[in-house]
């Protein structure tokens, strides 16, 4: 009878130990997988915590009285960038480019809707639009200061002013990009110096209109957060829209903008007011304690 190979028993032992090890590893697999899953989740939580924005609290004692929350990482860059873009239009000094008909632009190149306002020149309406815009600014600031007090009012004024500044920057970029001639360049009523100046090519879109609608919209959200159970926010919105609409109408009647410029400005301004207000939704919550009040932030943008 042939001798049995000597490696059979060790081989059986190795296979048995291998199977036992595989079974043990399989039994421990869920726990290991769970630990692996927990590690990225914890890492993500740490990164999210580190990425939180830095709030600006003008006064911890009055934090709950503000409609908007300021953030270092949002407001400083937005205000600075918007100021640069808004001032870009001041560098425009080239006369408008258009198809000439004599010494003015040819109205035939306009769309049928805007063509009715070609050649309009009424400086008095331009003055009215300036007064209406500045009056809206003054009214918004007065409302916030009277309703909230100095510190809280100034906090919310920054957000409303930011809405207005962004609503200035966007039209500035648009006017420089399109270089659309103003309505008065399509006639001879306006002085030649006005028709040939750099400002004569800044028609689309109306910054007066966009600023007015941005302020009106932002003030509505401010009033709604300060007085959520009151009809006051709707009164604020109604007054704001009436003033903003009158400013837009005056810009058209003055010959500074076409109706499409004013309508576009209204859309841009109202949209900016909504977005800026949403970004600055106040997450401040004041918790009473035995020694006073504790300010906490319930969420961040």
Image (spheres, rainbow, N blue to C red):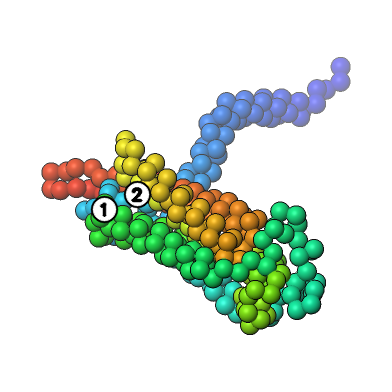
**For the residues marked 1 and 2, what is the alpha-carbon distance in whole angstroms?**
9 Å
Q: Write down the quadrant of residue 131 in the picture.
A: bottom left
Residue 237 location (% of width, % of height): 42, 46
Residue 175 location (% of width, % of height): 64, 67
Q: Write down the quadrant of residue 226 in the picture.
A: top left
Taking the image as drawn, is residue 121 in sight?
yes
Which image quarter is the N terminus in? top right
Residue beneath label 2, please? 67
The residue shown at (25%, 55%) is 146
Farthest residue in the left direction? 290
Q: Nearer the viewer, residue 121 or 258?
A: 121
Q: Which of marks 1 and 2 is in front?
A: 1
Farthest residue in the top direction? 1
Q: Is residue 1 above or below residue 147?
A: above
Farthest residue in the front direction? 189
In this figure, what is the number of numbered marks?
2
Taking the image as drawn, is residue 282 in sight?
no
Residue 50, disc: none
Asked if marks 1 and 2 touch (Cβ < 8 Å), the reply is yes
- Label 2 neighbourhood size at 10 Å, few (<14), some (14-19), many (20+)? many
Residue beneath label 1, please? 148
Q: Is residue 291 above or below residue 70?
A: above
Farthest residue in the right direction? 1
Q: Nearer the viewer, residue 184 or 7?
A: 184
Q: Nearer the viewer, residue 70 or 2?
A: 70
Query: Of helix, strand and loop, which one carries label 1?
Result: helix
115 to the left or right of 23: right
Query: Of helix, strand and loop, which one carries label 2?
Result: loop
Residue 174 location (% of width, % of height): 64, 64
- Label 1 neighbourhood size at 10 Å, few (<14), some (14-19), many (20+)? some
């Amino acid at each position: 009878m042939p001798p049995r190979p000597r490696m059979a028993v060790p081989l059986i032992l190795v296979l048995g130990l291998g199977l036992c090890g595989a079974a043990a590893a399989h039994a421990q697999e869920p726990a290991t997988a769970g630990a692996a899953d927990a590690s990225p989740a914890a890492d993500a939580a740490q990164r999210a915590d580190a990425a939180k924005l830095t709030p600006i609290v003008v006064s911890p004692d009055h934090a709950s009285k503000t409609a908007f929350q300021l953030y270092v990482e949002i407001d400083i860059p937005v205000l600075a960038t918007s100021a640069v873009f808004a001032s870009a239009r001041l560098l425009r000094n080239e006369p408008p480019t258009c198809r000439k008909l004599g010494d003015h632009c040819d109205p035939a190149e306009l769309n049928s809707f805007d063509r009715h306002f070609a050649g309009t020149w009424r400086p008095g309406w331009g003055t009215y639009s300036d007064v209406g815009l500045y009056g809206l600014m003054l009214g918004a600031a007065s409302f916030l200061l009277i309703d909230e007090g100095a510190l809280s009012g100034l906090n919310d004024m920054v957000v409303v002013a930011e809405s207005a500044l962004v609503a200035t920057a966007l039209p500035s970029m648009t006017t420089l990009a399109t270089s659309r001639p103003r309505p008065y360049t399509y006639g001879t009523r306006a002085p030649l110096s006005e028709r040939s100046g750099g400002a004569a090519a800044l028609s689309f879109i109306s910054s007066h209109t966009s600023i007015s609608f941005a302020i009106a919209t932002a003030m509505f959200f401010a009033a709604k957060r300060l007085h959520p159970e009151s009809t006051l926010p709707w009164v604020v919105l109604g007054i704001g829209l009436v003033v903003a609409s009158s400013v837009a109408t005056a810009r058209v009647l003055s010959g500074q903008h076409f109706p499409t410029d004013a309508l576009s400005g209204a859309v841009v301004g109202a949209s900016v007011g909504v977005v800026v207000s949403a970004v600055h939704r106040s997450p401040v919550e004041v918790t009473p304690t035995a020694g006073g009040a504790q300010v906490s932030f319930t969420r961040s943008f």
